[in-house]
Image (tube, rainbow, N blue to C red):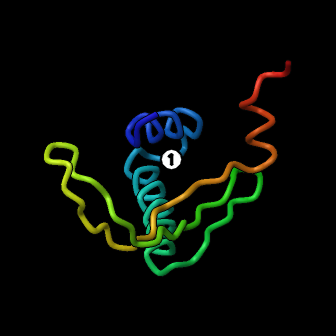
Amino acid sequence: MTRNELIDRLTALSPQLTTVDVELAVKLVLGAVASALAEGRRVEIRGFGSFGLNHRQPRLGRNPKTGELVPVPAKSVPHFKAGKDLRARVVAPR
């Protein structure tokens, strides 16, 4: 689902809200999550999941074209962990 599809679906579910209002709300929520992650904080949405950072150590990588060793610096990458309720809705029973 894209951001525009999310906005369209939320607008359809809440006809009292304008598309502009829904678009602003989605932008604010996603911006707040991105800002918190940029500051190194964790974001938890109960029943949905949590967003956090995984820290990767510096390492030596290899250029696939030349085979030359290349230093790869340490970095933090965003990580999402689904909550229990979301996992239960997504995973089909066996």
| 90 over 61 or under it: above or below | above
Q: Position of residue 42 (x, y in %)?
A: 61, 72
Quadrant in the rendering for residue 45: bottom right
Residue visible at 57% across and 77% down? 41
| Residue 21 picture location, percent across and down | 43, 54
Q: In which quarter of the image is residue 46?
A: bottom right
Q: Tag 1: residue type? A: Leu
Looking at the picture, tell me which residue is in the foreground, 46 or 74: 74
Determine whether, in the image, residue 55 is placed left or right of residue 5. right
Expressed as whole percent of the image width and height from the top left, the position of residue 11 reads 49, 39
Write the residue at 46% across / 50% down.
22
Which residue has dot 1 on it? 17
Q: Residue furthest left?
A: 66
Which residue: 54% across, 67% down? 53
Instruction: Tell which of 16 and 31 is nearer to you.
Output: 31
| Residue 25 spot, x, y in % from top left | 48, 58
What number of labels is visible? 1
Q: Is mark 1 on a helix, strand or loop?
A: loop
Which quarter of the figure is the C terminus placed in?
top right
